[in-house]
Image (cartoon, rainbow, N blue to C red):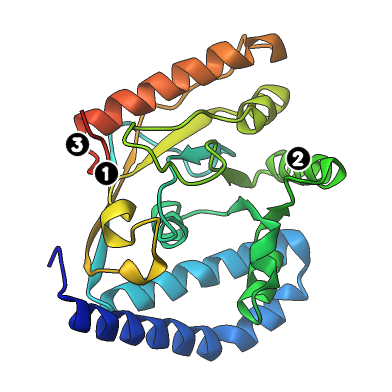
Amino acid sequence: MKTLFTPFRWLYVLYALLIFIAIMFAILPFFVIFSWGGRFHGANRMMRLCMFWADCWMPLVFMRHKNYFEAPHDPSRPTVFIANHISYFDAVILVKTIRQNFRPLGRAETAAIPIFGFIYRNAIVTVDRSDPKNRAESVSKLKELLQRGISIFVFPEGTFNMTSSPLKSFYDGAFRIAIETGTPIKPLLFLDGYKLMHYRHPFSLSPGLSRSVYIEEISVEGYTLEDIPILKKRVMELMERKLIEYQAPWIKG
């Protein structure tokens, strides 16, 4: 089902939202309990609960997810995960794709949403990009997680890619952290967020298949901070080539 007629789409979106909220309230007590466990062990359990939430919700709203591995991945090693960003639905895709202890970096503004915001700010690392001090604190938290063996996830584009190009320009943050901690970068491709929920309208949700691809891991061995532009270019060119190869639906021309 690629497209729903408008009346049915609104009914579907309402149904999907109600199911999402119902599951959230059903597991909320566990989030509260796990939040007492601190930002390492407790947050690990909260992220696992988010995975369970997505596992329950997607089949009930007629969606399924598939991960593809072009290259092997060792979940026992800390990794700097990155992916393209084009949809609100990427948050769901994220916890269906990475099935290990990890912590995403997310916008601080989302933490203001009632109830959901409590889960959000306790499960992930938030950042206020307008506040230099807060940005520095977020980077320190991400580095500490890697030092403790917990992987991190960053959208290097920073916000939605609203162009017809495979990617928009990358920020330095993820690459700087990877070099400073000596942690390899694992690029991921989120292929279907664009068609499942268009970035212009969160109420454009549609049922269907979500696919993610694990591509070649990039070692940062031998790179220095002066090499960040070179590393960014290497990773971006790899991801662009693969997105074109997989015929990502937003790419035109």
Q: Quadrant of the N terminus?
A: bottom left
Which label's residue is closer to the chain start, 1 or 3?
Answer: 1
Horizontal and vertical percent position of residue 40: 73, 58
Which of the two labelled residues, at mark 3 and mark 2, occupies the earlier sequence position?
2
In this figure, which residue is indicated by the disc labeled 2?
A: 139
Residue at numbered disc 3 = 247
Tell me the distance, in whole angstroms, between the alpha carbons under discs 1 and 3: 15 Å
Residue 182 located left or right of residue 37: left
Q: Position of residue 155 (x, y in %)?
A: 53, 42
SS at circle 1: strand
For the point 64% across and 47% down, the residue is: 150
Q: Nearer the viewer, mark 3 or mark 2?
A: 3
All told, the count of numbered labels is: 3
- The amino acid type of the residue labelled 3 equals Gln
Looking at this view, is 196 or 55 the one in front?
196
Question: Which residue is most to the left?
Answer: 1
Q: Which mark is residue 68?
A: 1
